[in-house]
């Protein structure tokens, strides 16, 4: 009989080569300590950590709020269009290395505007890197503008219109401090986004209650819920999410780092799958939470005794939930099916 170690090694190999899709990724959350320190020096930004080791030590969190402080401090070193290009291209290189074929990235323009960085520099750098990754590595992508829910919603519509004029926006999202900032605050800009034909997603039910997920569905009319792990507290909500095939973009390493769950083996992802929900696995802010998409998949599947078939299901769910053309989805599904067949002895 095969030992447990061999089975886990086999699963890790299977996941590493598996064609993947990522749907919940904040580009500012891919800022590795090396680039953070380099950009702080290059741009003359004073940050409390002077070495890579000190920055790494600071990447320890008690909850979402303690993380956001470090995250926004990190984002303050991003000043020039070239900085956003390098940050985004470094993430896309990780995608190439991890067989991520399609990715949907969030960015937080309000943070950069507050730091005095022009919107055109932020979007110019990100979009140029996404174009280069598509041309050179055939990785497709979509860019999602996130509004920070702890800010005033009033200027949101004007910001959305400015961003759309620059081009390359596929949809809008809602992130940052969830508790005390219910989705309904941003009803107006989500209505406008829908009228413009943009996709809509929102973080809900990470630290916040199931009521925030209901609001995201009923008031913001979102197509996906980011996180959403607290939905299991409300059976009627689970029925709604299952019936309407609303995908959840779950981020297990993030949930453990921010103490939504005490450890991976306590994560409810297995129960979410059993409930029939359209679950996907994502890395959220991988530079801060200890791993990119492959590490999230391998760590979670092995901690919860899930299988290679579950990994295939998670990736099929991600393809179905992606904001790309039907033609692209068919191509991604074909790659997954072929990979599944080629590895069927596992
Ligand atoms: Zn997130």
Image (cartoon, rainbow, N blue to C red):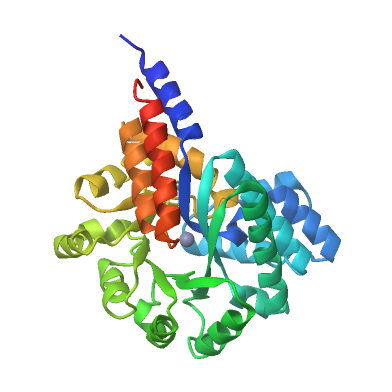
Q: Residue at x 34, y 12 (%)?
A: 2
Residue 339: x %, y % from top left? 42, 33
Q: Does residue 211 show up?
A: yes
Q: Residue at x 57, y 80 (%)?
A: 164
Which quadrant holds the C terminus? top left
Residue 314: x %, y % from top left? 35, 45
Q: Is residue 49 left or right of residue 134?
A: right
Viewer-closest of 307 and 77: 307
Viewer-closest of 51 and 160: 160
Q: Does residue 258 show up?
A: no
Residue 117: x %, y % from top left? 72, 76
Q: How many marks?
A: 0
- Above or below, 112 relative to 242: below
- Above or below, 331 relative to 218: above
Taking the view exactly as shown, the residue that stands out farthest to the front is 327
Q: Residue at x 40, y 69 (%)?
A: 201
Which quadrant holds the N terminus? top left
Q: Is residue 77 left or right of residue 101?
A: right
């Amino acid at each position: 009989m095969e030992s447990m170690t061999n089975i886990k090694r086999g699963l890790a190999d299977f996941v590493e080569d598996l064609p993947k899709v990522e749907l919940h990724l904040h580009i500012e959350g891919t800022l590795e300590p090396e680039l953070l320190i380099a950009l702080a020096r290059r741009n003359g930004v004073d940050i409390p950590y002077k070495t890579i080791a000190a920055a790494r030590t600071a990447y320890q969190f008690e909850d979402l709020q303690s993380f956001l402080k470090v995250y926004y401090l990190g984002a303050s070193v991003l000043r020039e269009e070239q900085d956003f290009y390098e940050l985004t291209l470094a993430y896309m290189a990780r995608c190439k290395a991890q067989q991520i074929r399609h990715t949907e990235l969030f960015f937080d323009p309000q943070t950069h505007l507050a730091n005095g960085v022009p919107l055109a520099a932020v979007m110019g750098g990100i979009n140029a890197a996404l174009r280069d990754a598509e041309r050179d590595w055939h990785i497709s992508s979509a860019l999602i503008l996130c509004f920070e829910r702890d800010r005033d919603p009033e200027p949101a519509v004007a910001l959305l219109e400015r961003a759309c004029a620059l081009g390359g926006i596929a949809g809008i999202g809602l992130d940052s401090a969830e508790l005390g900032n219910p989705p309904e605050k941003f009803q107006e800009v989500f209505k406008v986004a829908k009228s413009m034909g943009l996709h809509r997603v929102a973080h809900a039910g990470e630290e916040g209650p199931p009521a925030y997920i209901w609001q995201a569905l009923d008031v913001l009319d979102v197509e996906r819920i980011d996180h959403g792990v607290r939905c299991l507290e409300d059976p009627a909500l689970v029925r709604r999410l299952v019936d309407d095939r609303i995908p959840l973009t779950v981020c297990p390493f993030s949930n453990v780092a921010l103490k939504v769950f005490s450890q991976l083996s306590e994560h409810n992802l297995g129960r979410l799958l059993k409930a029939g929900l359209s679950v996907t696995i994502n890395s959220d802010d991988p530079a801060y939470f200890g791993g990119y998409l492959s590490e999230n998949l391998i760590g979670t599947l092995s901690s919860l005794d899930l299988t290679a078939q579950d990994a295939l299901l998670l990736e099929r769910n991600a393809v179905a939930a992606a904001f790309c053309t039907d033609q692209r989805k068919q191509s991604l599904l074909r790659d997954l099916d072929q990979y599944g067949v080629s590895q069927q002895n596992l």
